[in-house]
Image (cartoon, rainbow, N blue to C red):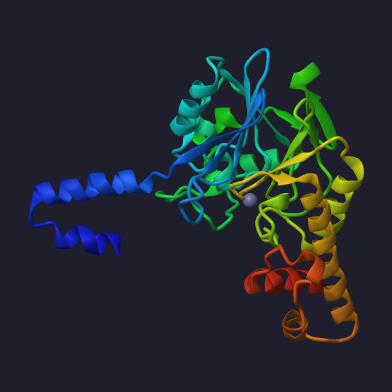
Amino acid sequence: MRRTLCLTTLTVAGVLLAVVANEARQDRFRIRTLELAENLYVLTSDPAEQGMRTGGNTAVLVTASGVALVDTKIRGYGEDILARVREITDKPVTTIINTHTHWDHSGANTEFPDTVDFVVHENTAAHMASSDCDDGAGFQGGSIKNCEAFTGDDSRYLPRITFENRTSLFSGPDQIDLYYFGRGHTDGDTWVVFRGARAMHTGDMMARKGLPFIDADNTNGSATAFASTLRNAVDTIRNVDTIIPGHADDPLAWDDLVDYAAFYNDLLTRAQEGAAAGRSVAETVAGYSVPEEYSDFQAPANRVEQIVGLIYEGR
Ligand SMILES: [Zn+2]
């Protein structure tokens, strides 16, 4: 489509340049800054625009010693993120936590100074270090695949700080607690709790109020474990009021996460009952509808199909 547009205007070089320049501008989606607390902000995409836009939501915590970011959106948005941080504080970015490895959450990691401390779950670190994995997404506007992002010269951006189940960074009002509760969207999803602000970034364990994508093929995500991982998070984490979802433009509340865990666990139960009763995946999918009490959650047909299919396979 784009190529056709360029070729038809190729006759006049000036027109072509104007079209290319205009497209470059149009390719950049806007970032919106929301203030959640005195020292905590979230950089979302613009609700007026549609689709993936800038990628996952970026949290910005201004600590006594510098700025900690959670997730870096899509490749190419590093400067945009830094510009927004500079509107908030003069302090440098010192720490970047990635909730998981995906291209729309760690895409701009290599656009920050390599002096930044990068922090991830140990399984996510392994995915980043592997050059042969492929999440099928590829970066917007390029052919670089997720796991090729940290190869060659950029291997200096591989995270050196990892954890297994739980760790904390900073102290006092700056304290960040990192949790791993098991496989789900991938096998390295970190839950990031901002103690002072009573807020938590869930990454794509709760991307929005809707059924998740499970990356079972490339990063060992699990539709079956997703249910217990959500329950573990709800049962373990305390003193959080505000949820920063992986992708939704507006913050959610703790109760939304509690409902989400129940909503997802209901689907797991139905899939397991369907399998036990000898119904096919298609029959179970056809028989599914969102329960009345979770009617504010989305269940796109392709997501129901993927999740039920994986659960039937025990994945
Ligand atoms: Zn993801």
- Residue 281, placed above or below residue 155: below
Residue at x-position 59% and y-position 42%: 57
Residue at x-position 66% and y-position 23%: 39
- Residue 247, placed above or below residue 120: below
Give the camera-side residue of 149 and 281: 281
Percent of width and height locating residue 109: 55, 33
Percent of width and height locating residue 84: 49, 28
**Quadrant of residue 188 in the image?**
top right
Residue at x-position 76% and y-position 54%: 184
**Quadrant of residue 197 in the image?**
top right
For residue 100, side relative to residue 227 (left or right): left
Q: How many marks?
A: 0
Residue at x-position 62% and y-position 46%: 250
For residue 159, side relative to residue 55 (left or right): right
Residue 51 appears in view: yes
Residue 170 appears in view: no
Q: In the rendered view of the protein, which quadrant contains the C terminus? A: bottom right
Give the camera-side residue of 283 and 129: 283
Q: Residue furthest left?
A: 12
Give the camera-side residue of 51 and 93: 51
Q: In the rendered view of the protein, which quadrant contains the N terminus? A: bottom left
- Residue 104, placed above or below residue 170: below
Percent of width and height locating residue 160: 68, 27
Percent of width and height locating residue 299: 68, 68
